[in-house]
Image (tube, grey):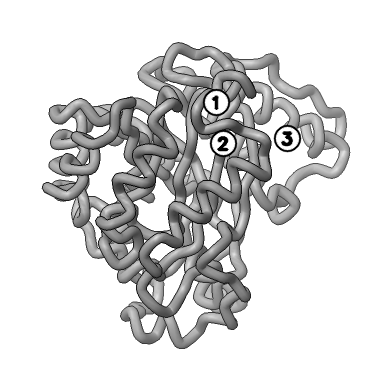
């Protein structure tokens, strides 16, 4: 299938309205379980911070829905972190008391884009998160430069940066409008690792134009590439609709969300490599098709493999065997 070529303006024009957010509050916050680098299940504070929209317009992205049209006000990020930790009952001075060891500061953009996270807020952020074992942020390779390592020098704990690879498919990657080459990705990851920063990555499962099996195959190839570059953790993201562009493609027969069995296959392959942590994102799992008889059993199996990082016995189903 041939995908229509879309530029940033065309992608933005197909978007529905943004959600109503305010700069003094994150748009979501929670405590979730995740295996750490030692394969020990830990509690992680995950904050979805409200800030300036990402300057890139990726075709598959829906994170812009909870962003500001203006630059993030100075002091807003610190206020959001403080509020969320208090609401979750986590003492920033002793997060271990709440059995929490890591914190994700996801801002639907790039943490080291100064329009999204003002430099003036860095010291306050570092003070709020200094007692967590690991601090995880998200960032585009274009922003993995001097500023990132300046922030790291102020942070007395392990910094981990999540960088979106998405896919290594030679036609789909440029079509995604991510404005990144595989070589730029590799250089960014190698720079992080050489500087003592841990790297994780996001990989799409079944981007548009790929068949079900192609979606599995290219996701597995992308995991291998990420590990080859030096990534320690791969977070797998099933492609979904809801951002305007993806809905148009689905209506045109160019996109269909992956099946649950495909998610199992990709996660099995990734964990089976034994090269680092591999997680399957189960948000919006109701959007993914599968046999109604064994659907919940398969989702539960994926969730267990996420937490144990070990292969689980397969699901036996008389209906779809």
Residue 16 pos. (x, y %): 58, 81
Q: Residue at x 60, y 25 (%)?
A: 43
Q: Nearer the viewer, mark 1 or mark 2?
A: 1
Asked which secondary structure carries label 3, the reply is helix
Tag 2: Cα neighbours inside 10 Å, few (<14), some, or many (≥20)?
many
Image vertical order of residue 194 relative to residue 246, above or below: above
Tell which circle, 1 or 3, labels the residue nearer the N-terminal end: 1
Q: Which residue is mark 2?
A: 45
Q: Residue at x 55, y 77 (%)?
A: 244
Asked whether 181 or 319 is in front, the reply is 181
Say which quadrant the C terminus sits in.
top right
**Based on the displayed image, in which of its 4 quarters is residue 91 positioned?**
top right
Q: Which mark is residue 95?
A: 1
Tell which circle, 2 or 3, labels the residue nearer the N-terminal end: 2
Residue 150 pos. (x, y %): 16, 42
Residue 50 pos. (x, y %): 50, 62
Asked whether 117 or 214 is in front, the reply is 117
Say which quadrant the N terminus sits in.
bottom left
Q: Residue at x 45, y 27 (%)?
A: 132
Q: Mark 2 near mark 3, Cβ–Cβ under 8 Å?
A: no
Tell which circle, 1 or 2, labels the residue nearer the N-terminal end: 2
Q: Which mark is residue 9?
A: none
Tag 3: Cα neighbours inside 10 Å, few (<14), some, or many (≥20)?
some
Q: Mark 1 near mark 2, Cβ–Cβ under 8 Å?
A: yes
Q: Which residue is mark 3?
A: 299
Q: Nearer the viewer, mark 1 or mark 3?
A: 1
Residue 136, visible in the rendered structure: yes
Q: Is residue 106 left or right of residue 121?
A: right
Q: Nearer the viewer, mark 2 or mark 3?
A: 2
């Amino acid at each position: 299938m041939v995908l229509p070529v879309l530029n940033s303006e065309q992608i933005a024009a197909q978007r529905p309205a943004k959600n109503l957010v305010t700069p003094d509050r994150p748009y979501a916050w929670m405590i979730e379980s995740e295996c750490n680098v030692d394969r020990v299940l830990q509690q992680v504070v995950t904050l979805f911070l409200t800030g300036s929209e990402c300057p890139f317009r990726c075709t598959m992205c829906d994170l812009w829905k909870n962003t500001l049209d203006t630059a993030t006000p100075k002091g807003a990020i610190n206020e959001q972190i403080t509020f969320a930790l208090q609401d979750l009952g986590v003492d920033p001075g002793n997060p271990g008391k709440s059995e929490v060891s890591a914190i994700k500061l996801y801002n639907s953009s790039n943490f080291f884009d100064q329009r999204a996270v003002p430099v003036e807020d860095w010291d306050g952020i570092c003070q709020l998160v200094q007692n967590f074992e690991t601090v995880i942020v998200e960032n585009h390779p274009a922003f993995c430069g001097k500023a990132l390592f300046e922030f790291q020098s102020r942070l007395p704990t392990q910094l981990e940066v999540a960088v979106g690879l998405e896919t290594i498919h030679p036609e789909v990657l440029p079509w995604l409008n991510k404005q990144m080459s595989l070589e730029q990705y590799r250089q960014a990851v190698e720079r992080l690792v050489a500087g003592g920063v841990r790297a994780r990555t996001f990989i799409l499962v079944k981007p548009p134009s790929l068949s079900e099996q192609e979606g599995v195959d290219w996701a597995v190839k992308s995991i291998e590439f990420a590990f080859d570059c030096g990534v320690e953790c791969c977070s797998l993201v099933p492609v979904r609709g809801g951002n305007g562009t993806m809905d148009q493609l689905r209506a045109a027969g160019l996109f269909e969300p992956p099946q649950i069995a495909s998610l199992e296959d990709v996660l099995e392959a990734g964990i089976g490599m034994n090269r680092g942590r591999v997680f399957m994102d189960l948000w919006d799992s109701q959007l993914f098709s599968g046999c109604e008889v064994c659907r919940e059993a398969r989702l539960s199996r994926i969730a267990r493999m996420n937490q144990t990082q070990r292969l689980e016995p397969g699901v036996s189903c008389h209906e779809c065997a």
